Amino acid sequence: MVNPQWVDTIFVRKGDFLSLSFSFNADYENAVQLYRSPEDNNWIDSRSNRGGAGPDFRLAPAKEDTWLYLIGWHKGAIYNPHLKWEQSKMRSVTDYPPRPVQKTVTSFEDGSDNDYDDVVCTYFITPRP
Ligand SMILES: [Ca+2]
Ligand SMILES: [Ca+2]
């Protein structure tokens, strides 16, 4: 079960571009996944501090108004395959620098120290040029 309080819902208008970048600062194993539905196990993209932040993820221009869902996960240890993934607490701050660009910083906490930088996803939504 996903706790909806810690799901970042991303709204992308038809024709807009979404670009996400990721960073990690955690002692425990952390991951973040982008979904088309919060109840769906089929994620679109995934990053972890085990696999690395990787390149920015860029979604093709939305063919229709689209909702996407960003959810963070962690284990209470470093790279222990026997532990279950637990959902991470989430904070999200959005601003519009300058409009109509949207910039959002969504950060996740694995529960060890409340620094909320265990996974940080920064994303921009920009209109079609
Ligand atoms: Ca941290
Ligand atoms: Ca932390």
Image (spheres, rainbow, N blue to C red):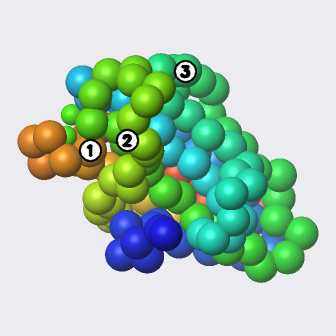
Q: Position of residue 81 (x, y in %)?
A: 47, 26
| Pointer 2 local density, CA inside 10 Å: few below 14, some 14–19, many at least 20 | many
Labels 1 and 2: the sequence-earlier one? 2
Pick the residue in front: 115 or 111: 111
Instruction: For ligand 2, tell me if the residue under mark 1 lies within 8 Å.
Output: yes
Residue at point 59%, 24% (across, down): 54
Which label belongs to residue 110? Answer: 1
Q: Position of residue 76 (x, y in %)?
A: 27, 36
Report the amino acid beneath label 3. Answer: Gly
Indicate the secondary structure of the residue bearing disc 3: loop
Labels 2 and 3: the sequence-earlier one? 3
Q: In this view of the protein, can residue 99 be seen by the observer? A: no
Q: Is residue 108 above or below residue 103?
A: above
Residue at point 37%, 67% (across, down): 6
Write down the residue under mark 2: 74
Q: Quadrant of the C terminus?
A: bottom right
Pick the residue in front: 83 or 9: 83
Residue at point 43%, 50% (across, down): 72
Residue at point 82%, 65% (across, down): 62
Real-space Cα distance between discs 1 and 3? 17 Å
| Cβ atoms at labels 1 and 3 below 8 Å apart | no
Write down the residue under mark 3: 51
Report the amino acid beneath label 1. Answer: Asp
Q: Is residue 54 above or below residue 95?
A: above
Real-space Cα distance between discs 1 and 2? 6 Å
Report the amino acid beneath label 2. Answer: His
| Residue 39 shown left or right of residue 86 in the figure | right
Instruction: For ligand 1, tell me if the residue under mark 3 lies within 8 Å.
Output: no
